Image (cartoon, grey):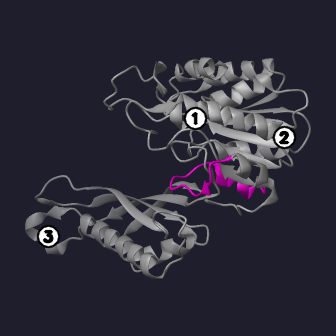
Amino acid sequence: MRVLELLDRLIAFPTVSSDSNLALVDWAQAQLAGAGFEVTRVPSSCGEKAGLIARRGGEGGLVLSAHTDVVPASGQAWTRDPFALACEGDRLFGRGTTDMKGFVACCLALAEELPESAGPLAIVLSWDEEVGCRGIPQMMPAVRELLPDPALCVVGEPTSLVMATGHKGKAAYRATCRGEAGHSAMAPRFRNALHVACDLVAAVRAEQARLMAEGAQDPGYDVPCSTLHVGTLHGGTALNIVPDRAEVAFEIRHLASETPEAILPRVMAGLENVELEQTIAYPGLDTDPEQPALARLRGLARGTGKVSYGTEAGYFAAAGIPTVVWGPGDMAQGHQPDEFIEVSQLVDCMEALRRLVA
Protein backbone atom coordinates (compact mmCIF):
# COMPACT_ATOMS: atom_id res chain seq x y z
CA MET A 1 0.00 0.00 0.00
CA ARG A 2 1.31 3.39 -1.01
CA VAL A 3 0.37 4.85 2.39
CA LEU A 4 2.85 2.51 4.10
CA GLU A 5 5.66 3.54 1.75
CA LEU A 6 4.97 7.19 2.47
CA LEU A 7 4.69 6.60 6.22
CA ASP A 8 8.00 4.73 6.21
CA ARG A 9 9.65 7.80 4.68
CA LEU A 10 7.91 10.24 7.03
CA ILE A 11 8.92 8.34 10.18
CA ALA A 12 12.55 8.42 9.04
CA PHE A 13 12.54 12.21 9.41
CA PRO A 14 13.25 12.82 13.14
CA THR A 15 11.16 15.98 13.30
CA VAL A 16 11.17 16.45 17.07
CA SER A 17 9.83 19.93 17.85
CA SER A 18 13.21 21.09 19.16
CA ASP A 19 14.80 20.35 15.77
CA SER A 20 14.29 21.55 12.20
CA ASN A 21 11.61 20.01 9.98
CA LEU A 22 13.04 21.39 6.73
CA ALA A 23 14.20 18.04 5.32
CA LEU A 24 10.68 16.63 5.65
CA VAL A 25 9.15 19.81 4.21
CA ASP A 26 11.50 19.71 1.20
CA TRP A 27 10.49 16.11 0.51
CA ALA A 28 6.76 16.68 1.05
CA GLN A 29 6.82 19.78 -1.15
CA ALA A 30 8.31 17.74 -3.99
CA GLN A 31 5.73 14.99 -3.50
CA LEU A 32 2.80 17.43 -3.61
CA ALA A 33 4.16 19.41 -6.55
CA GLY A 34 4.68 16.13 -8.41
CA ALA A 35 1.03 15.29 -7.77
CA GLY A 36 -0.07 18.49 -9.50
CA PHE A 37 -0.64 20.71 -6.49
CA GLU A 38 0.27 24.36 -6.30
CA VAL A 39 2.49 24.48 -3.22
CA THR A 40 3.28 27.54 -1.10
CA ARG A 41 6.01 27.34 1.50
CA VAL A 42 5.54 29.34 4.71
CA PRO A 43 8.80 29.81 6.65
CA SER A 44 8.91 30.11 10.41
CA SER A 45 10.00 33.36 12.00
CA CYS A 46 13.26 31.69 13.07
CA GLY A 47 13.95 30.39 9.56
CA GLU A 48 14.74 26.86 10.75
CA LYS A 49 11.28 25.41 10.10
CA ALA A 50 8.50 25.76 7.56
CA GLY A 51 4.98 24.74 6.69
CA LEU A 52 3.24 24.00 3.42
CA ILE A 53 -0.07 25.04 1.88
CA ALA A 54 -0.81 22.85 -1.13
CA ARG A 55 -3.96 23.27 -3.22
CA ARG A 56 -5.57 21.85 -6.32
CA GLY A 57 -8.79 23.04 -7.89
CA GLY A 58 -10.68 26.25 -7.33
CA GLU A 59 -11.99 27.95 -4.24
CA GLY A 60 -13.95 26.17 -1.54
CA GLY A 61 -13.60 22.45 -1.11
CA LEU A 62 -11.88 20.41 1.57
CA VAL A 63 -8.85 21.32 3.68
CA LEU A 64 -6.83 18.55 5.34
CA SER A 65 -4.53 19.81 8.09
CA ALA A 66 -1.71 18.14 10.03
CA HIS A 67 1.45 19.00 11.94
CA THR A 68 4.85 17.62 10.99
CA ASP A 69 6.56 17.71 14.39
CA VAL A 70 6.67 14.89 16.94
CA VAL A 71 7.45 14.64 20.64
CA PRO A 72 10.88 13.35 21.73
CA ALA A 73 11.63 9.65 21.98
CA SER A 74 14.72 10.12 24.13
CA GLY A 75 14.29 9.07 27.73
CA GLN A 76 11.53 6.62 26.84
CA ALA A 77 11.85 2.84 26.99
CA TRP A 78 11.57 2.06 23.28
CA THR A 79 12.23 -1.55 22.25
CA ARG A 80 12.87 -0.61 18.61
CA ASP A 81 14.28 2.32 16.64
CA PRO A 82 11.65 5.08 16.99
CA PHE A 83 12.60 6.59 13.64
CA ALA A 84 12.39 3.42 11.55
CA LEU A 85 8.93 2.08 10.71
CA ALA A 86 8.41 -1.46 11.99
CA CYS A 87 5.43 -3.62 11.06
CA GLU A 88 4.27 -6.39 13.38
CA GLY A 89 0.94 -7.92 12.46
CA ASP A 90 -1.60 -5.10 12.13
CA ARG A 91 0.59 -2.64 14.05
CA LEU A 92 3.00 -0.10 12.63
CA PHE A 93 5.54 1.14 15.20
CA GLY A 94 7.46 4.41 15.12
CA ARG A 95 7.50 7.90 16.58
CA GLY A 96 4.64 9.81 15.01
CA THR A 97 2.78 6.85 13.50
CA THR A 98 -0.31 7.89 15.46
CA ASP A 99 0.47 11.53 16.25
CA MET A 100 0.22 12.30 13.42
CA LYS A 101 2.28 11.17 10.45
CA GLY A 102 -0.18 8.37 9.72
CA PHE A 103 -2.67 11.02 8.65
CA VAL A 104 0.04 12.93 6.75
CA ALA A 105 0.81 9.75 4.79
CA CYS A 106 -2.90 9.40 3.97
CA CYS A 107 -3.01 13.00 2.75
CA LEU A 108 0.00 12.51 0.49
CA ALA A 109 -1.37 9.24 -0.89
CA LEU A 110 -4.72 10.90 -1.58
CA ALA A 111 -2.96 13.75 -3.38
CA GLU A 112 -1.20 11.28 -5.69
CA GLU A 113 -4.35 9.42 -6.67
CA LEU A 114 -6.82 12.31 -6.75
CA PRO A 115 -9.11 11.92 -9.78
CA GLU A 116 -9.75 14.81 -12.16
CA SER A 117 -13.40 14.78 -11.10
CA ALA A 118 -12.55 15.48 -7.48
CA GLY A 119 -13.50 18.81 -5.94
CA PRO A 120 -11.00 21.39 -4.68
CA LEU A 121 -8.56 20.02 -2.14
CA ALA A 122 -5.98 21.75 0.06
CA ILE A 123 -3.39 20.21 2.38
CA VAL A 124 -1.87 22.30 5.19
CA LEU A 125 1.23 21.02 6.99
CA SER A 126 2.46 22.98 10.02
CA TRP A 127 5.28 22.92 12.57
CA ASP A 128 5.61 23.12 16.38
CA GLU A 129 2.11 21.95 17.28
CA GLU A 130 3.51 19.76 20.04
CA VAL A 131 4.97 22.73 21.91
CA GLY A 132 1.84 24.86 22.07
CA CYS A 133 0.55 25.24 18.49
CA ARG A 134 3.24 27.80 17.72
CA GLY A 135 3.48 27.26 13.98
CA ILE A 136 -0.09 27.49 12.74
CA PRO A 137 -0.68 31.10 13.94
CA GLN A 138 2.25 32.14 11.74
CA MET A 139 0.64 30.30 8.81
CA MET A 140 -2.92 31.60 9.19
CA PRO A 141 -2.47 34.85 7.21
CA ALA A 142 -1.33 32.78 4.22
CA VAL A 143 -4.10 30.24 4.80
CA ARG A 144 -6.72 33.00 4.73
CA GLU A 145 -5.23 34.48 1.55
CA LEU A 146 -4.73 31.26 -0.38
CA LEU A 147 -7.79 29.37 0.87
CA PRO A 148 -10.47 32.07 1.00
CA ASP A 149 -13.63 30.00 1.34
CA PRO A 150 -13.14 26.32 2.30
CA ALA A 151 -16.26 24.23 2.81
CA LEU A 152 -14.68 22.13 5.57
CA CYS A 153 -11.38 21.72 7.40
CA VAL A 154 -10.42 18.33 8.84
CA VAL A 155 -7.57 18.37 11.37
CA GLY A 156 -6.33 14.79 11.31
CA GLU A 157 -5.31 14.20 14.92
CA PRO A 158 -5.95 10.62 16.07
CA THR A 159 -9.60 10.16 17.05
CA SER A 160 -10.03 6.51 15.99
CA LEU A 161 -12.01 8.00 13.07
CA VAL A 162 -14.63 9.51 15.38
CA MET A 163 -15.56 13.03 14.30
CA ALA A 164 -14.67 15.39 17.16
CA THR A 165 -16.41 18.76 17.14
CA GLY A 166 -14.88 20.24 20.27
CA HIS A 167 -11.90 20.55 22.58
CA LYS A 168 -10.88 22.98 25.29
CA GLY A 169 -8.58 25.93 24.74
CA LYS A 170 -5.42 26.39 26.76
CA ALA A 171 -3.39 29.20 28.29
CA ALA A 172 -0.16 28.49 30.19
CA TYR A 173 1.69 30.86 32.49
CA ARG A 174 5.05 31.27 34.19
CA ALA A 175 4.75 33.08 37.52
CA THR A 176 7.89 34.54 39.08
CA CYS A 177 7.38 35.06 42.81
CA ARG A 178 9.66 37.60 44.49
CA GLY A 179 10.96 37.40 48.07
CA GLU A 180 13.86 38.72 50.13
CA ALA A 181 17.03 36.75 50.77
CA GLY A 182 18.12 36.39 54.37
CA HIS A 183 19.44 34.01 57.02
CA SER A 184 16.81 31.48 58.01
CA ALA A 185 17.46 32.19 61.69
CA MET A 186 15.80 35.56 61.02
CA ALA A 187 13.15 34.16 58.68
CA PRO A 188 10.15 36.16 59.96
CA ARG A 189 11.92 39.38 58.98
CA PHE A 190 12.08 38.45 55.30
CA ARG A 191 9.50 37.74 52.63
CA ASN A 192 9.79 34.09 51.58
CA ALA A 193 9.30 33.66 47.81
CA LEU A 194 8.15 30.08 48.32
CA HIS A 195 5.41 31.32 50.64
CA VAL A 196 4.29 33.68 47.89
CA ALA A 197 4.33 30.76 45.45
CA CYS A 198 2.28 28.64 47.84
CA ASP A 199 -0.29 31.42 48.08
CA LEU A 200 -0.54 31.31 44.28
CA VAL A 201 -0.94 27.51 44.30
CA ALA A 202 -3.67 27.84 46.92
CA ALA A 203 -5.44 30.41 44.73
CA VAL A 204 -5.26 28.05 41.75
CA ARG A 205 -6.80 25.26 43.84
CA ALA A 206 -9.54 27.54 45.11
CA GLU A 207 -10.48 28.65 41.60
CA GLN A 208 -10.55 25.02 40.43
CA ALA A 209 -12.96 24.19 43.24
CA ARG A 210 -15.12 27.16 42.27
CA LEU A 211 -15.22 26.12 38.61
CA MET A 212 -16.20 22.58 39.54
CA ALA A 213 -19.05 23.86 41.70
CA GLU A 214 -20.22 26.96 39.84
CA GLY A 215 -18.50 27.16 36.46
CA ALA A 216 -19.77 26.23 33.03
CA GLN A 217 -20.26 22.52 32.43
CA ASP A 218 -20.07 20.48 29.23
CA PRO A 219 -20.88 16.77 29.63
CA GLY A 220 -19.14 16.05 26.33
CA TYR A 221 -15.81 16.06 28.19
CA ASP A 222 -14.52 13.54 30.74
CA VAL A 223 -13.89 16.52 33.02
CA PRO A 224 -16.92 18.68 32.23
CA CYS A 225 -15.61 22.03 33.53
CA SER A 226 -12.67 24.28 32.80
CA THR A 227 -9.56 23.10 34.66
CA LEU A 228 -6.49 24.62 36.30
CA HIS A 229 -3.26 22.75 36.93
CA VAL A 230 0.08 23.56 38.59
CA GLY A 231 2.83 21.67 36.81
CA THR A 232 6.07 22.82 38.43
CA LEU A 233 7.24 24.83 41.43
CA HIS A 234 10.92 25.70 41.85
CA GLY A 235 12.63 27.90 44.39
CA GLY A 236 15.27 28.22 47.07
CA THR A 237 18.97 27.43 47.17
CA ALA A 238 19.61 26.11 50.70
CA LEU A 239 17.61 25.34 53.82
CA ASN A 240 19.28 28.10 55.83
CA ILE A 241 18.55 30.84 53.26
CA VAL A 242 15.16 32.51 52.89
CA PRO A 243 14.47 32.19 49.14
CA ASP A 244 14.16 35.43 47.20
CA ARG A 245 12.76 33.85 44.05
CA ALA A 246 10.40 31.01 43.15
CA GLU A 247 8.82 30.02 39.86
CA VAL A 248 5.44 28.39 39.31
CA ALA A 249 4.17 27.03 35.98
CA PHE A 250 0.42 26.59 35.70
CA GLU A 251 -2.23 26.28 33.02
CA ILE A 252 -5.90 26.92 32.34
CA ARG A 253 -7.79 24.58 29.99
CA HIS A 254 -11.06 26.33 29.33
CA LEU A 255 -14.41 25.51 27.83
CA ALA A 256 -15.55 27.54 24.84
CA SER A 257 -18.07 29.32 27.07
CA GLU A 258 -15.31 30.57 29.41
CA THR A 259 -12.06 32.42 28.77
CA PRO A 260 -8.72 32.50 30.56
CA GLU A 261 -9.08 36.28 30.65
CA ALA A 262 -12.13 35.82 32.88
CA ILE A 263 -10.61 33.08 35.05
CA LEU A 264 -7.11 34.48 35.62
CA PRO A 265 -8.08 37.66 37.52
CA ARG A 266 -9.84 35.57 40.15
CA VAL A 267 -6.64 33.55 40.63
CA MET A 268 -4.44 36.62 40.92
CA ALA A 269 -6.76 38.74 43.08
CA GLY A 270 -4.98 39.84 46.24
CA LEU A 271 -1.62 38.29 45.33
CA GLU A 272 1.42 40.54 45.51
CA ASN A 273 5.05 40.19 44.41
CA VAL A 274 4.12 37.94 41.49
CA GLU A 275 5.18 38.62 37.89
CA LEU A 276 3.15 36.71 35.31
CA GLU A 277 4.12 35.72 31.76
CA GLN A 278 1.90 33.82 29.33
CA THR A 279 3.96 31.11 27.64
CA ILE A 280 1.38 29.23 25.55
CA ALA A 281 -2.13 29.95 24.33
CA TYR A 282 -4.37 28.37 21.75
CA PRO A 283 -8.11 28.58 21.17
CA GLY A 284 -10.62 25.84 21.81
CA LEU A 285 -13.02 24.30 19.31
CA ASP A 286 -16.78 24.25 19.56
CA THR A 287 -18.30 23.31 16.19
CA ASP A 288 -22.02 22.67 15.81
CA PRO A 289 -22.18 18.97 14.86
CA GLU A 290 -25.35 19.61 12.85
CA GLN A 291 -23.72 22.08 10.46
CA PRO A 292 -24.54 21.13 6.86
CA ALA A 293 -20.81 21.28 5.99
CA LEU A 294 -20.22 18.31 8.30
CA ALA A 295 -22.94 16.08 6.91
CA ARG A 296 -20.82 14.06 4.50
CA LEU A 297 -18.02 13.35 6.98
CA ARG A 298 -20.55 12.66 9.72
CA GLY A 299 -21.88 9.84 7.55
CA LEU A 300 -18.38 8.40 7.13
CA ALA A 301 -17.15 8.82 10.70
CA ARG A 302 -17.45 6.29 13.52
CA GLY A 303 -19.63 8.56 15.59
CA THR A 304 -19.20 12.07 16.98
CA GLY A 305 -17.79 13.44 20.21
CA LYS A 306 -15.16 15.73 21.73
CA VAL A 307 -11.51 15.22 22.62
CA SER A 308 -9.64 16.09 25.79
CA TYR A 309 -6.42 17.26 24.12
CA GLY A 310 -5.79 20.49 22.23
CA THR A 311 -5.26 20.83 18.49
CA GLU A 312 -4.78 23.46 15.80
CA ALA A 313 -8.46 23.23 14.87
CA GLY A 314 -9.46 26.32 16.85
CA TYR A 315 -7.38 28.54 14.58
CA PHE A 316 -9.22 27.38 11.46
CA ALA A 317 -12.58 27.72 13.20
CA ALA A 318 -11.67 31.25 14.30
CA ALA A 319 -11.10 32.07 10.62
CA GLY A 320 -14.72 31.15 9.93
CA ILE A 321 -14.02 27.70 8.46
CA PRO A 322 -16.26 24.80 9.59
CA THR A 323 -13.69 22.60 11.34
CA VAL A 324 -13.56 19.18 12.98
CA VAL A 325 -10.89 16.85 14.33
CA TRP A 326 -10.93 13.43 12.67
CA GLY A 327 -8.11 11.03 11.98
CA PRO A 328 -6.72 7.50 12.26
CA GLY A 329 -5.19 6.06 15.41
CA ASP A 330 -5.82 6.35 19.12
CA MET A 331 -4.24 9.18 21.11
CA ALA A 332 -3.69 6.67 23.92
CA GLN A 333 -0.72 5.52 21.80
CA GLY A 334 0.53 9.04 21.14
CA HIS A 335 3.60 10.28 23.04
CA GLN A 336 4.21 6.74 24.33
CA PRO A 337 7.26 4.48 23.89
CA ASP A 338 6.67 2.01 21.07
CA GLU A 339 3.99 4.28 19.63
CA PHE A 340 1.96 2.46 16.99
CA ILE A 341 -1.00 2.73 14.67
CA GLU A 342 -3.07 -0.12 13.27
CA VAL A 343 -2.88 -0.73 9.51
CA SER A 344 -6.66 -1.13 9.47
CA GLN A 345 -7.06 2.45 10.74
CA LEU A 346 -5.03 3.75 7.77
CA VAL A 347 -7.01 1.60 5.33
CA ASP A 348 -10.31 2.90 6.69
CA CYS A 349 -9.04 6.49 6.74
CA MET A 350 -8.03 6.30 3.08
CA GLU A 351 -11.36 4.85 2.08
CA ALA A 352 -13.23 7.61 3.91
CA LEU A 353 -11.04 10.32 2.38
CA ARG A 354 -11.63 8.95 -1.11
CA ARG A 355 -15.36 9.10 -0.57
CA LEU A 356 -15.14 12.53 1.02
CA VAL A 357 -13.46 14.09 -2.05
CA ALA A 358 -15.39 12.05 -4.66
Label located before the other in sequence (3 or 2):
2
Residue 187: which quarter of the image?
Answer: bottom left
* Residue, disc 1: 345
Distance from Cα at disc 2 to Cα at disc 1: 31 Å
Decide if residue 145 is on the left or right side of residue 79. right
Q: In this picture, is 277 found above or below 8? A: below
Three-letter amino acid code at the position of disc 1: Gln
Which residue is depicted at the point 49% across and 44% down?
331
Q: For the residues carrying marks 1 and 3, which lies nearer the camera in this image?
A: 1
Pointer 2 with pointer 1, Cβ within 8 A: no
Which mark, by number, is residue 146? 2
Region rendered in magenta: 301-320
Distance from Cα at disc 3 to Cα at disc 2: 62 Å
Q: In this picture, is 9 found above or below 224? A: above
Label located before the other in sequence (1 or 3):
3
Three-letter amino acid code at the position of disc 2: Leu
Residue 174, x across and y down, in percent: 42, 57
Label located before the other in sequence (2 or 1):
2
Q: What element carries label 2?
A: helix
